[in-house]
Image (cartoon, helix red, strand yellow):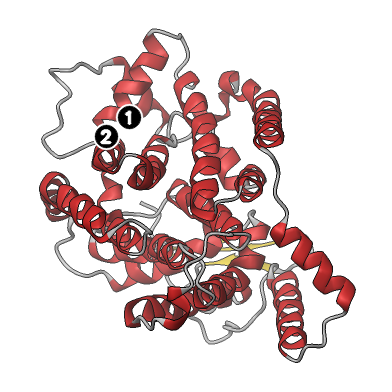
Amino acid sequence: MTFVNNANAIAIEVRDQEGRLVISSLEPTKNSNLFEPGVWAPPILTANLIFLFLVILNYKKGLPVTIKKSIKFIFEYEVSHKVALIIVVSLIAIYVIFNVSKIWNPEEESWGDYEIAVSQAKNWSAFSNISLSLGSDLRFFLLSISLNIFGNIRIIPFIVSISLLVMTYYLAAELSKKRFAGIISIVILLQSNLFLKYSVSATEDNTWTLFYILSLYLVYKKWFLSPLAYGLSFLSKPLTAIFLPMTFFFIYTSSLSKKEKTRTALLYITTILIPVVIAIYLYRGTSFDPNGFWTGLIAFQIFLRFDGLILVLLLPLAIGLFVASKKGILHADSLMILITGILWSAPLLAGFAEITNQAYRFVPLVVFFAIGISILFSNNMNKQLVTKKNFVTTLVSLFTIVTAFVSVILVIFPNLIQISYKLF
């Protein structure tokens, strides 16, 4: 690691033992190589070239019959309710066994915001902690219960993360209409380094992500409760305010009737829109910060550098969801806009709200990536979508592919955008 100090910034460059570039936030220099490939370049290029080769073979009808049958079997495979229950319980049990020790792990105590979280939890009260600035009151309320009732501030966050695994399964199964797809989503979420890092964390817990996923699930199960779940997510982390357009698009592309869509949208407008507008007004920056915007744009390759599956498969997933959408698979468009929205939230927050980026804000991306993969196994189709041309969904698809392509390019060439990284 090389540190270069000057009057304007701290420049950081990180390389692995073989000298390959991992992360760079250097100021532009005459000798800098913008197109120096990073450590993830070989696996990403290899995986994407294989994917492209298979797509071309399939288009030319050149795939071997054995491979076609195997792919068809995997995509059509389903499990019974009983088997699905056993597998889900087993996966959660494995997660609990390997992560329960983190409840007493002091590693988190060295994090910068840990003491703030503990202090807020200790001093929380219903009367003194009503936030006039729309703060994270619900989050600190739950941390207060965890600390004062259970004796450990990480108990509730751990339970929340277990609930997030369950909720991910149910949302994936609901959208895809396949229990096997829901199981796949849990497996993908469990292999994520980012999810595991914050799954037993009081400093940056997953409460806001859980309630937001719940709000999407309730659009189908109990539409009138969906805004309530969204509101709880908003009270856990005001950052959820920028997710509202994504929620409206999810409602718009859902399989609900036109009447149900209108009722759900109106309920969101009357109960959620005003607090969200106030939050955006309070957290807006005084001016646009170009450096912050570019910093946010490279946040994906910085914070997900240990999540190889996402880095390698992000672009193939975007293309796969685009193809699925064209075939009439429901919710492929919804997952594209959810993934794209998270990717763009980092540069928009850093550029317009003057908020520094943090790794935990990409946990919803991991969840949506997992559900997006499961959508590819979906049996939930609407044949009318195949013949019905929709400019909005087509635009979303193309924008998602472009966003995924840019994100992957910035991972392949970490030095392509050279800026002074805003640490504080």
Q: Position of residue 382 (x, y in %)?
A: 47, 68
Task: Tell which of 8 and 362 is nearer to you.
Answer: 362
Q: Residue at x 26, y 44 (%)?
A: 238
| Cα–Cα gap, marks 2 and 1 | 5 Å
For the N terminus, the quadrant is bottom right
Are circles 2 and 1 on residues that touch, CB within 8 Å?
yes
Residue 21 image-quadrant placement: bottom right
Q: Quadrant of residue 285?
A: bottom left
In the rendered structure, find residue 249 and report the number of the disc placed on it.
none
> As displayed, is residue 98 above or below residue 415?
above
| Nearest to the observer: residue 181 or residue 120 | 181
- Residue under numbered circle 1: 139
Q: Considering only vertical position in the picture, is 158 above or below 334?
A: above
- Residue 359 in the image: x percent, y percent? 48, 50
Q: Which residue is mark 2?
A: 136
* Three-letter amino acid code of the residue under disc 2: Ser
| Along the viewing direction, whichever of 353 and 369 lies nearer the viewer | 369
Badge count: 2
User: What's under tag 1, amino acid-wise?
Assistant: Arg
